[in-house]
Amino acid sequence: MSYVLGIDGGGSKTVCILMDDIHQVVGRGQAGAANYQSIGIETAFTSIQSAIHEAVKLIKTIEINAICLGLAGVGRPEDIKVVKHLIEQLINSKTLPITWNLQPFNIVICNDALIALVGGIGHPVGIVVAVGTGSIVFGRNHQGKTKRVGGWGYILGDEGSAYKIAVAGLKAALKSYDGREKYTSLIADFKQHLDLENIEDLIEVIYRRGWGVKQIAALAPIVDLAAASGDEVANNIIDDAVGELVKATATVIEAIFIPNSVLEIVTTGSVWRGRCKIQQRFTAAIVNRFPQVKVIFPRYEPAYGAGLLALQSLAGKEGI
């Protein structure tokens, strides 16, 4: 029996699964964030090591034959060098009850979009539309060609994301309050949620408290609920978000798949779980343009996708 590790290192948590060669998960661990570009390499190393330790803690000793790390923000050659050094630290760590039997081609380093695609669909062909605080669309075809659209961050991109939905909702509420735009229930909704006496107090909340991206993005459910309740302004915001995500997805389809290809699109991230049926809206719009596609929710978690990629490296399928 061969064993591999699949690691999903994100901006908020790190998940590690221990998988055998018949695709069964025999251990799982979770720890803190592992985006080294935002928290530093030492903190990222600690999170990854802790997640691995948790995944293998029920086994006294185990031999690991392959490892895949899918990490947020990894994609450039310099990122790969950093992560390779991190893996060397793991191999030399005396705190893990692991015997490492790794060849260079059994060490897979990739970004978290690829493992979300593989985990979400169950194999490495298709498209993932990941929409949470930020947004990115990533696809891979049967020939191994990939295409990414978006993922440029909250200032330069992230169209359709929770952050952009929240900001659009806040702007709409203030425009409505000014009289520049039509009435929206978002004024009352934001006041109630944030315990404001007046919508003008948003200035103090957003600017003077120094709210960051995640805090603002956490207001997206307010817009979602307003849209689900029938608010026209909120529904227009959601429709605009859907339009951006459809445009990005169509760009990926047309770039790497032949016309009329049958493929699956997996939708991952917090935005899709809203009450305003945003996934159904997206599905209707994309299927209208590409009738042969199927939109699904994830079949497995991203860490499972990392495990599958590690197993594929054992089978000699390099370059995935």
Image (cartoon, rainbow, N blue to C red):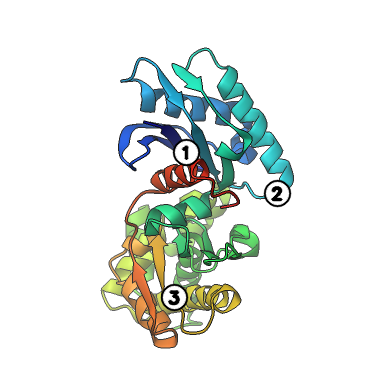
Q: Residues within 10 Å of mark 3 (few under 14, many from 20)?
A: many
Say what secondary structure mark 3 lies in.
Answer: helix
The image quarter in which residue 299 lies: bottom left
Q: What mark, if any, has residue 7 been given in the picture?
A: 1
| Image position, residue 313 (x, y; %) | 52, 43
Q: Give the amino acid at mark 3.
A: Val
| Position above or below: 231 against 82 | below
Q: Nearer the viewer, mark 1 or mark 3?
A: 1
On screen, 133 above or below 188? above
Marks 3 and 2 in Cβ contact (< 8 Å): no
- Disc 1 marks a residue whose amino acid type is Ile
Q: Nearer the viewer, mark 3 or mark 2?
A: 2
Q: Secondary structure at mark 1?
A: strand
Counting other residues with Cα less than 10 Å from the Cα at mark 1, is it few (<14), some (14-19), or many (20 or more)? many
Q: Position of residue 270 (x, y in %)?
A: 38, 57
Q: Is residue 85 above or below residue 234?
A: above
- Residue 86, image x, y percentages: 62, 29
Of all residues, the one furthest to the right in this rendering is 78
In the rendered structure, which disc, 3 or 2, sits on the residue that comes first in sequence?
2
At 30% from the left and 67% from the top, the residue drawn is 225
First along the sequence among labels 1 and 2 = 1
Instruction: Say which mark, if any, is on residue 76.
Output: 2
Q: Earlier in the sequence, mark 1 or mark 3?
A: 1
- Which element carries disc 2, helix, strand or loop? loop
Residue that mark 3 sits on: 242
Q: CA distance from mark 3 to mark 2?
A: 29 Å
- Residue type at numbered disc 2: Arg
**Mark 2 and mark 1 in contact (Cβ < 8 Å)?**
no
* Label total for image: 3
